Image: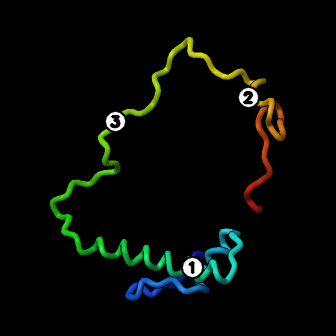
Amino acid sequence: MFDIIAMNMSSLTLTKEQVNKIARLTKLPLSDEQAVTLSYLLSDTLRTIDTLKELDTTNVEETYQVNGLTNVYQKDEENRQTLPKEKALQNAGEVVKGLFATKAVFDR
């Protein structure tokens, strides 16, 4: 089920066929020319990322962000003005039970 790509990690190269397989799984239509281009670009990206293995990170503290921001959310205020629901929905393509509606994005 999860056999998506059997990749040769020593060469870090994605073949055109592997790119086409990923495209099929993601339902992304690609021409042969686009598959070749993506094969080159993705392979180059993998090789660039692989060079990070050469770095000595033994004394580097783990982090999940690097900009130092700690709380980027807006403070709640009781009297803050918001867009009325009717105005928000006025240009919606489809409204169901007072909510935006879209076509399904998953095949089941």
Q: Are marks 1 and 3 in contact (CB under 8 Å)?
A: no
Mark nearer the viewer, 1 or 3? 1
Tell me where residue 106 sits by quadrant. bottom right
Q: Residue at x 78, y 30 (%)?
A: 89
Question: Dot 2: within a 10 Å radius of its alpha carbon, few (fewer than 14), some, or many (20 or more) residues?
Answer: few
Could you say whether the residue bearing mark 2 is in a helix, strand or loop? Answer: helix
Quadrant housing the C terminus: bottom right
| Residue at position x 36%, y 71% in the image | 49
Q: Residue at x 80, y 34 (%)?
A: 91
Which residue is under mark 1?
Answer: 37
Q: Position of residue 73 (x, y in %)?
A: 45, 31
Q: Secondary structure at mark 3?
A: loop
Q: Establish if 57 lies above or below 68.
A: below
- Residue 96 point in image, percent of width and height: 83, 36
Residue 46, percent from left and from top: 42, 75
Query: Left or right of 1: which side holds 93?
Result: right
Residue 4: quadrant of the picture: bottom right
Q: Comparing marks 2 and 3, which lies closer to the viewer?
A: 2
Does label 1 or label 3 sit earlier along the sequence? Answer: 1
Residue 28: mark in rendering: none
Q: Which residue is mark 3?
A: 70
Looking at marks 2 and 3 on the same chain, the residue that comes earlier in the sequence is marked by: 3
> Could you tell me the amino acid type at mark 2?
Ala
Q: Which is more foreground, mark 2 or mark 1? A: 1
Left or right, 19 with respect to 92, comes to left
Residue type (three-letter) at the residue carrying disc 3? Thr
**To which residue does mark 2 refer?**
88
Q: Secondary structure at mark 1?
A: helix
Say which residue appears at 63% left-offset and 77% top-offset.
34
The amino acid at mark 1 is: Thr
